[in-house]
Image: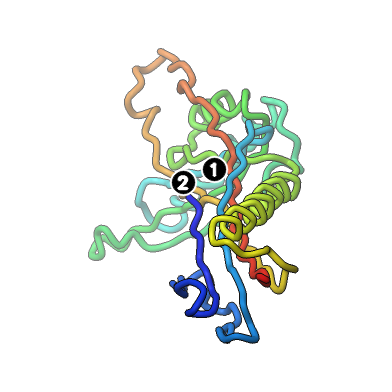
Amino acid sequence: MNYLRVFAMPAVFATALSVSAQQATQPELKVDSSNRTLTVTADESVSAEPDLAIVHIGFETQPSDPQTAYANGARISNAIIGALKQAGIAETDIRSESQYLQRDYTEPKSHKFKLTQQWTVRTSPKRAAEILDDAVTAGANSSGAIDWTVKDESALEEQALEKAATRAKRNAAVLAKAMGVQLGALIYASNQLSRPAFPRPMEMRALAMARPGEPSPPLAIEPQKVTRSASVYAVYAVD
């Protein structure tokens, strides 16, 4: 959606301004006979197929005494990493997010503890479901979120910014023509890039639902397109 805003002498055409939270830091322009300006804001987005999947893998042990929780956690932790490496994931593509032994506050009087650990695993989009399945089979019972992205995010952001800038300039020309004025030089421009927030890891209990000795097939997962958005605010002089 594109928003058009106009500044000019009251005798020529009405002046309108709606300052949004995004533009709170933009300069205030004086509107009088010595400063005739026209402003535009244009928003554009660019989408692409992902070429990288970041899979969130983790587990949580059953509540027990600290020593047992830690021992069980170590066993599960090594089993998961072993499964990932067996699947061909390089060590450089596995990164620890968090690991901690903490009190089980769901039953405060029990004085039991549980060990929690989380990793991120980089892989190709077509292998995301397979890698998630391998990790869950090895004991990753708190896993599932996948960040779909591209290796060159800057290129995608530049495309969105270029589209927004082109749209802003085109809108300014159309608006100036419609208002019967001549579009002048660019006085000021600013931009803002945005990206969607990644989901937090979700809990999976696939192993608990599977029957003993009956392997479950990988989840049917379809990659999401990667989108980057840009907003350009521009101020032009008018003659």
Query: In the image, what residue occupies the spot 55% across and 76% down?
Result: 8
**Residue 147 x, y percent position in the rendering:** 56, 42
Q: Quadrant of residue 108?
A: bottom left
Which amino acid type corresponds to the residue marked 1 in the rendered image? His
Q: Residue furthest top?
A: 214
In this picture, is 14 found above or below 193?
below
Mark 1, Cα crowd under 10 Å, few <14 / some 14-19 / many 20+, is many
Asked if the residue at tag 1 contacts the one at tag 2, i.e. Cβ–Cβ closer than 8 Å, the answer is: yes
Query: In the image, what residue occupies the spot 58% across and 48% down?
Result: 44
Which amino acid type corresponds to the residue marked 2 in the rendered image? Pro
Query: In the image, what residue occupies the spot 48% across and 50% down?
Result: 1
Q: Which mark is residue 201?
A: 2
- The answer to whether one can see residue 97 in this image is no
**Residue 140 x, y percent position in the rendering:** 49, 37
Q: Which residue bears the numbered disc 1?
A: 56
User: For numbered disc 1, what is the local secondary structure?
Assistant: strand
Q: Nearer the viewer, residue 61 or 152?
A: 152
